[in-house]
Amino acid sequence: MRHFRDEAGVDWKVFLTARGSDAVSREHSLPEAFREGWLVFESQREKRRLAPIPANWESLSDQALAALCTRAVTQTARLKAAEGKPAAADPLRPKLQEAEQQLDKTLAEVCETPSASRLDTGQLIRVEESLALAAEAAKEAVSIRRKIRADSDRTESPRPGPASAGDAAERGEGRP
């Protein structure tokens, strides 16, 4: 993974989605250019993909990466129909984005690691620590997503009138 700042002052991270990864394994649904993998350019506000993967992209200058970024195709944000309202309207979104970015970062670090058999003990400890960070970030993201969903469900379908016996049973109240 690389980080750079473009001429407009936007901070980007760039990483490889390689052939053999889960995303690339769905070859039948990918455009031809993306079937061998692609580079992902990601900022706070957008994500772009570039294929084919340029040779030696890891060693290119920040200026060269910025030039590649301008050639990359912008990915459009996909809203889930069930959410029904723009993502930015929810006050929990920034926390969710932060947790997801931490998860992306730690997973990318681990995925760049050579095979475990070639790591020394110190490097293996670093992998373990990174995976623990990823697990915590994933738990936080799941928790926030559930909270957003619960808040959304609550605002979309308020219960009119008094609670029924069926509602009490769903909550575990009433008869055993």
Image (spheres, grey):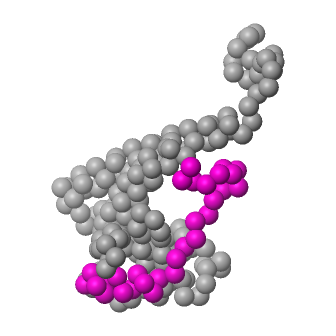
Q: Is residue 50 above or below residue 127?
A: below
Q: Is residue 151 above or below residue 161?
A: below
Which residue occupies 39% across, 44% down? 136
Which residue occupies 56% across, 49% down? 89
**In this picture, which residue range is highlighted in magenta?**
61-89
Does the magenta run of residues contain 74?
yes
Does the magenta run of residues contain 88?
yes
- Residue placed farthest to the top in the image? 175
Q: Position of residue 60 (x, y in %)?
A: 27, 85
Q: Quadrant of the C terminus?
A: top right
Residue 1 appears in view: no
Which residue occupies 62% across, 63% down? 78
Q: Quadrant of the N terminus?
A: bottom left
Left or right: residue 130 versus residue 35 is left
Q: Position of residue 21 (x, y in %)?
A: 49, 70
In this orientation, which residue lies closer to the viewer: 22 or 13?
A: 13
